[in-house]
Amino acid sequence: MSSPAPVVRGQALSGHNRISTQALTSLAKAAAAQALGVDAQDVRADWTDDDGLLALSLVTPISIPPLQSVVLDAARVETAGGSIWDRTVKAKESILARVSELSGSQLSRVDIRVSGAKISTGGRVR
């Protein structure tokens, strides 16, 4: 009777792994929701082929501070993480890095279309 060969951490094994489109989509929606301060169920994610890499397209609302609080204290915009534009640009980088790291997939880009705003009454907007 022989025992199986021990598996060494980091050792390459034959075969392949596949991550379903549904799993990638769920991951992308969660990463976007976290970066933009919204619920994942409010994010729509679509994938396209970009010369062999994955291009991610998101349609999502973004959380914002109450406008009345911004009128009373303009610094509230910076406290919330910056303008909608600045936060969206930062989110693209964050989402690309997070999805690539967790899935092992190579993304060429992340496109975000902001579809609305959700008022956040808490502290810093994600």
Image (cartoon, rainbow, N blue to C red):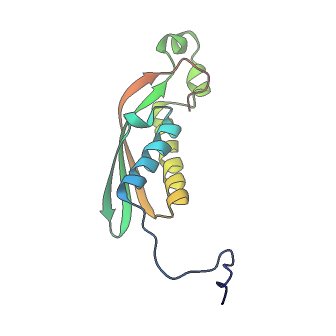
Viewer-closest of 30 and 68: 30
Q: In this view, does 35 lie above or below 96?
A: above
Relative to residue 8, is residue 44 depicted above or below?
above
Name the quadrant of the C terminus: top right
Horizontal and vertical percent position of residue 113:
35, 39
- Residue shown at 45%/32% (left/top)? 39
Q: How many labels does the image show?
A: 0
Q: Is residue 45 left or right of residue 95?
A: left
Q: Which residue is drawn at 51% across and 50% down?
A: 93
The image shows residue 23, relative to residue 90, as above or below, that is: below
Spot occupied by residue 43 in the image (x, y as percentages of width and height): 38, 38
Residue at position x 33%, y 55% from top? 47
| Extreme residue in the front direction | 1
In this view, the residue in front, 51 or 101, is 101
- The quarter of the rendered structure image containing the N terminus is bottom right
- Give the percent coordinates (x, y) of residue 42: 38, 33
The residue drawn where x is 46% and y is 49% is 27
With 70 as the anchor, is 18 left or right in this view? left
Horizontally, residue 93 falls left or right of residue 116, namely right
Q: Nearer the viewer, residue 72 or 2?
A: 2
Q: Position of residue 125 (x, y in %)?
A: 56, 28
Task: Give the farthest residue toward the bottom.
Answer: 1
